[in-house]
Image (spheres, rainbow, N blue to C red):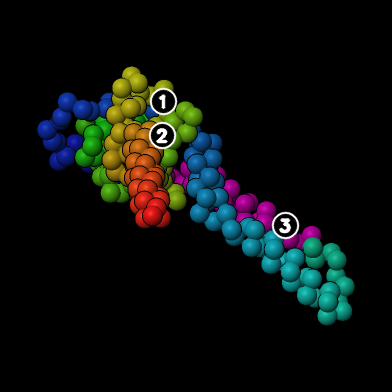
Amino acid sequence: MFKNLAKFAKKITKMLIKTKKYELPTKTYRRLGMRYMFKKQWWLPAAIFGGIVLLNILINVLGYKNWWIYTLAPIGAWGWYLFWWIQYTGIPQMPQNKVMFEKFMYEITSQQILIKKTQQEGMVIKWDMIKEAYKTVDAFVLVISKAQFLHFPFKIFNSDGEMKFLEAILGRKNLIQTTEKLENTDNKNTNQKTATNKVNIQSNGVAQKTGKK
């Protein structure tokens, strides 16, 4: 997994983030995984619950009274939750995944993310490998797959400038919506409304002028 960093040696630009060393806690990993699955499959436990309820209603209408089957609806929904909870609890225990939970330092540029285990060992993550990202109250989270996440707590950055630079990169990659993008969107909407109002005013003026004898 880790290769000699000499293969990835590149010219370092002035805009470079070098984080402190950080080890992803297994509890945090499980929380990130469950959040991801809730976001992607929120409809599935709801469908299991609703499907069992509707099936039993149909059975009751046909004359077979089995009220106890309703208890299977919450059990089925919780079964989905328990399945993924076990998955995200078990992944860190697997020998081949232990490396994901070691201490790393990250060097981040607009071209790539360099994950450094030591000064001689590391691996490169290209930005096109990141499926999505989001910002919480205390961290940035980058999603590589449903089983792999990059978790960057604010505490591992050396300055607010580094956090702002990372947020700007994520914004340029269209992975998150930054404040700048929101402002541009608001300005665009405001300009569109202003232009529409001007057209309406001009149209009203023409209508009034045409109506005069």
Q: Residues within 10 Å of mark 3 (few under 14, many from 20)?
A: some
Side of 103 where 35 appears, left or right? right
Q: Position of residue 207 (x, y in %)?
A: 39, 54
Q: Amino acid at mark 1?
A: Phe
Side of 27 where 75 appears, left or right? right
Q: Secondary structure at mark 1?
A: helix
Q: Which mark is residue 140?
A: 2
Does 76 lie within the magenta span? yes
Q: Position of residue 205 (x, y in %)?
A: 37, 48
- Residue under label 1, please give it: 154
Side of 38 where 49 appears, left or right? right
Residue drawn 31% across and 22% down? 161
- Residue under label 3, please give it: 75
Q: Amino acid at mark 3?
A: Ile
Of the residues tagged 2 and 3, which is closer to the observer? 2
Q: State how far apart marks 2 and 3 are (Cα).
A: 34 Å
